[in-house]
Amino acid sequence: MPAVTFDDVTKVYGEDTVALRDIDIEIGEGEFVILLGPSGAGKSTLLRVLNGLTQPTEGVVEINGEVPSGARKEVGMVFQEHYLVESMSAFQNALTGALARNGFFRSILTWQRTDDKRAALEALETVGLLEEAGQRAGSMSGGQKQRVGIARALVQQPSLLLADEPVASLDPKAARDVMGYMKQAAQERDLTAITSLHQVNIAREFGDRFLGIRDGEVVFDGDRDDLTMDVVDEIYYGEGADEGAVSTAGDVPPDPAERGGTADTPPAGSADPPATAEAAEAPDSPESVGGDGS
Amino acid sequence: MSIPEVDTQLGKLKRSRRLKQGLALGLLVAVLVVTYFGLGFVNFEVDEIIDGFPNFVDFIAAFFPPNFEAMTIYTTDNGITGLEGIWASFSDPGRLAESLGSPRLSLVRAAVVTLLLGFLGTVLGFLPALLLGVLGSEQVTPFPFNFIFRGIMSAIRAIPAIVWIFLFVPFGPPSQATAVLAIATDTVGNLGRLFTDELEEIEEGPIEAIQSTGASRAQTVGFGMLSQVSRSYIAWTLYILEINTRIAISLGVVGAGGLGLYVRNQQDLFQFQNTAAGIIMIFVVVLSIELLSSRIRARLRPSEHEGKGFLQSLRDLASPGKWLGLDRDKGEKS
């Protein structure tokens, strides 16, 4: 049985904003899947449909053969901005992953079971932060915070780990660390993982399978060898991208500062496609992008 | 070179500036007119103030030297007057203990009563304030139902503690017990409002994250919302404790006991030097609470606490400059 099944899933927001269009995919148990695609392509909606925060308009999503309804503890979620409670320690943040297993009063009085406390410490160990368990989340670096976010998801003891742009606001080194820990956690715990990413070089390094999403449709589904730069161009800029002025080789979007100054910008000349949300929102017409860049 | 669009824009800016100046002038005139006629309305005669000033100086002179004879039972019984009363009282802890343990009048006991009125009122008001404050937030109770709780708090807040104590007359005349009740009621309105406001400004992210773990609604409120504001809640509670100590003094004046009652009684008896001693005690009590509370609140501000060890914090406690907020750590947070 596949871990995740999308059966003709369509999601329409409002009257006619189509976020997902006839998505029909299966993801096997233990696969490490990376979603690629420009901002607004539907990656986040796909993840939200999976963790039950959004319901599909048409079609059915199944996780381990069941249709999710509402947030589920079997699905762990890692957010782009880590979303930790900054005044609490790393340990306390990780422990919130066990809330669904505890009653309100037990949790509010911090009478969590020893098993849960152990699980929280083990999860912090998995992400290399056991020593920092008592440190206040607010005083941690971006990469450390994101690793605590992963630990929190692991404490849920999920079978499916989702991550929405988990390294978008990190520098390249921290981004690699975080992805490394996530991959390791998934392998150690036999988790199926689905992560959306913008950094294609990091994606290639860690992913087993890649789904290219554009305008709510899956336009690519393959492994590392299939993910050539032409394919990446096509995912980000659409069909015929290579005919226009846009070429990913050396064509780094205008100015890092204009794009919010995120540190994950690939160096000029690297073979990466746009690394940040704004950059990836390049207009459909290749000519206009080429004009911008020149 | 003149660009017509620039001239148009310049004209617009000038007109808007003139309009603002006109409005500001109108406002100033209105304030002056209301003040002028208002002073007449309330019979405020500047002449009388000026004429009465020499009397005021004489009156204040009668307060000196302050007489601390009532500091403890020991000083009262032994007729130790003036500032010596302070030394005689504090040189022997047994004399302080004797006064605290006896229902007889002493400044030491009155000060403790005042402190306790503020403290107990804050403690008893805290839980209802927390409940109403949390329920009043749109994060927890959907609009417009949250306004039921906000409305209750507004109604409580509209009536000051000094009026509440008279509304509690069925429970007894103004006394220490009804003062605690009045301060607690006042706390519900004020502290609850602060709690609500604080909750409205929290970040959505952690709430969504806690929801995504499959936590229940109550757990989401507890861990996604209240955990974000716990430090500020403690800080606001300390701030209200400060205010409640002052309220305890004004309630004392209307009969609730403590330093307020002592000052009023001595004033009624024309014992102005005793009044002065009472006022100095009020000064010491209020300032102590304020300093203590503001130092703890500063500690609760994460930026100041960061990267500081326990020992460093203890050293800070011993530094007078820190207490008075004179020297701030610079560049502590990189």
Image (cartoon, rainbow, N blue to C red):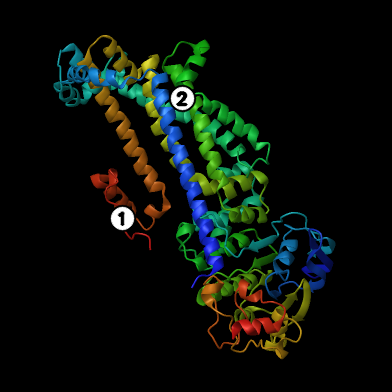
Return the mark for residue B329: 1
Q: Is residue A111 visible?
A: no
Kindly identify the residue that appears in the image at 65 percent across and 60 percent down: A157
Mark 2 lies on residue: B183
Kindly identify the residue that appears in the image at 48 percent across and 21 percent down: B181
In the image, residue B306 lies at what x, y percent? 39, 56
Kindly identify the residue that appears in the image at 73 percent across and 69 percent down: A42
In the image, residue B102 lies at what x, y percent? 30, 15
At numbered mark 1, what does the secondary structure look like: helix, strand or loop?
Answer: loop
In the rendered image, which quarter contains the C terminus of chain B?
bottom left
Q: Is residue B234 left or right of residue B273?
A: right
- Residue B86's image quarter? top left
Vertical placement of A101 versus A292: above or below? above
What is the three-letter code of the residue carrying label 2? Ile
Mark 2, Cα crowd under 10 Å, few <14 / some 14-19 / many 20+, is: many
Looking at the rendered structure, the number of numbered marks drawn on it comes to 2
Vertical placement of A16 versus B30: above or below? below
